[in-house]
Image (cartoon, helix red, strand yellow):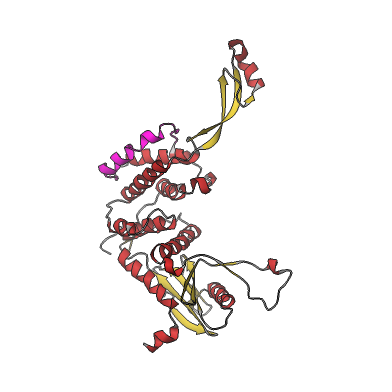
């Protein structure tokens, strides 16, 4: 591939969609941009993301403090006051909570911004843009990147926008490094299938929400199509879809899969679609198709790998269209987008497609 930054750029686009960091045609502008080095690309994400966060307001939280003060605030630390004889100076040691921006999330942001400013692969223009963000983080403690406990950072409604930014920061620290393999750029092995699978699912869902809101993209739970009400139905496992699209009485259930191996190999060396994946999507489809009219289809959408054989299944089972195919993320964004648009065609009646 002539442009080794394509896959890296698409990871950025996936992250931007997944965490709704872009709107409308902003994706095309991002995808068209070229980056000579991966850290330059990641710096651009932080420039845009942290800049937007500053405008919304940095996340603040109540942090525990202990200080020697002249007035009582919070809880008096009697032992501490006696130990330093603060009462002789008309002061007391008090413990209290302070609502401030010096949170672990902002400390991580500041640490990585400084790290990128010092990195040789980041363009000077982006270094300058990062430097312009630092004054907004003056009240935040600068910590060593190696000391950041990424597993202890939690997210909720008030700081949800930090998930993308700190995900990028973690990639920078852990080493999202380019490695040559058949002319492509790949994530290093520390990025787990589970982590990438979660990103992949959310990316697909948000892509269709942005570009096809008329299809009501969502991730609903499929109810079990029970023959009769049962008091112990709560013991049934939930069937939550990754992406569900609906149009003109037809439904497409997409099950997103980001695996190192897109197919399983049987005892005789035969490559087949993962049986558990196929059983899962088939179960979703049959329980969703309560009218028994074949209006519900199911598609396993795997991220393309370097394997010789890739899933390419399109069959009708008991009246419902079931298939498996791949999405090649190591292609120019325009090609990736075409593949995503082709999936929408699964909402058409298969019989009408075959009659064409």
Is 124 part of what is drawn in magenta?
Answer: yes
Regarding residue 298, the answer to whether it shows in the image is no
Q: Which image quadrant for residue 152?
A: top right
Q: Is residue 63 above or below residue 123?
A: above
Please give the name of the residue rendered at 52% of the width and 82% of the height, measured from the top-left corner. 294
For residue 204, side relative to residue 129 (left or right): right
- Looking at the picture, tell me which residue is in the foreground, 69 or 82: 69
Residue 137: name its quadrant: top left
Viewer-proximal residue, 263 or 7?
7
Image position, residue 70 (x, y; %): 57, 17
With 270 as the anchor, is 288 left or right in this view? right
Residue 221 lies in what quarter of the image?
A: bottom right
Identify the residue at horizontal 32%, vertical 37% (top origin): 132
Return the x and y of residue 272 as percentages of the image width and height. 49, 77
Q: Is residue 236 visible?
A: yes
Q: Which residues are magenta?
A: 121-143
Residue sitting at the far bottom: 355
Front residue of 275/203: it is 203
138 is within the stretch colored magenta: yes
Please determine whether, in this image, residue 340 is positioned above or below residue 128. below
The image shows residue 199 at horizontal and vertical percentages of: 46, 59
Report whether 276 appears left or right of 10: right
């Amino acid at each position: 591939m002539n442009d080794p930054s394509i896959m890296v750029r698409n990871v950025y686009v996936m992250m931007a969609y997944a965490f709704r960091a872009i709107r409308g045609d902003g994706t095309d502008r991002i995808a068209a941009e070229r980056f000579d080095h991966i850290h330059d690309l990641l710096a651009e994400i932080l420039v845009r993301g942290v800049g937007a966060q500053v405008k919304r307001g940095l996340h603040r939280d109540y942090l525990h403090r202990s200080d020697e003060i002249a007035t009582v605030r919070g809880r008096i630390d009697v032992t501490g006051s006696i130990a330093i004889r603060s009462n002789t100076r008309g002061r007391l040691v008090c413990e209290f909570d302070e609502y401030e921006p010096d949170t672990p999330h902002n400390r991580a942001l500041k640490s990585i911004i400084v790290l990128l400013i010092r990195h040789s692969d980041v363009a000077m223009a982006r270094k300058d843009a990062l430097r312009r963000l630092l004054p907004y983080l003056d009240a935040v403690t600068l910590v060593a990147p190696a000391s950041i406990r990424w597993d202890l950072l939690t997210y909720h409604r008030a700081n949800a926008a930090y998930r993308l930014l700190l995900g990028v920061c973690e990639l920078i620290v852990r080493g999202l490094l380019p490695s040559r393999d058949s002319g492509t750029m790949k994530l290093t092995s520390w990025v787990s299938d589970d982590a990438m699978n979660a990103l992949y699912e959310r990316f697909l869902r948000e892509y269709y929400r942005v570009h096809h809101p008329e299809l009501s993209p969502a991730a609903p739970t499929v109810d079990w199509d029970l023959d009769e009400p049962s008091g112990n139905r709560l013991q049934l496992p939930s069937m939550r879809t990754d992406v569900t699209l609906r149009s003109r009485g037809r439904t497409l259930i997409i099950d997103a899969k980001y695996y190192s191996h897109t197919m399983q190999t049987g005892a005789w060396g035969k490559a087949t679609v993962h049986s558990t994946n196929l059983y899962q999507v088939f179960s979703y489809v049959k329980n969703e198709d309560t009218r028994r009219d074949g209006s519900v289809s199911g598609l396993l959408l795997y991220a393309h790998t370097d394997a010789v054989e890739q899933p390419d299944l399109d069959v009708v089972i008991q009246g419902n269209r079931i298939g498996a195919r791949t999405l090649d993320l190591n292609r120019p964004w325009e090609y990736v987008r075409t593949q995503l648009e082709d999936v929408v065609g699964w909402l058409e009646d298969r019989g009408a497609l075959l009659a064409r």
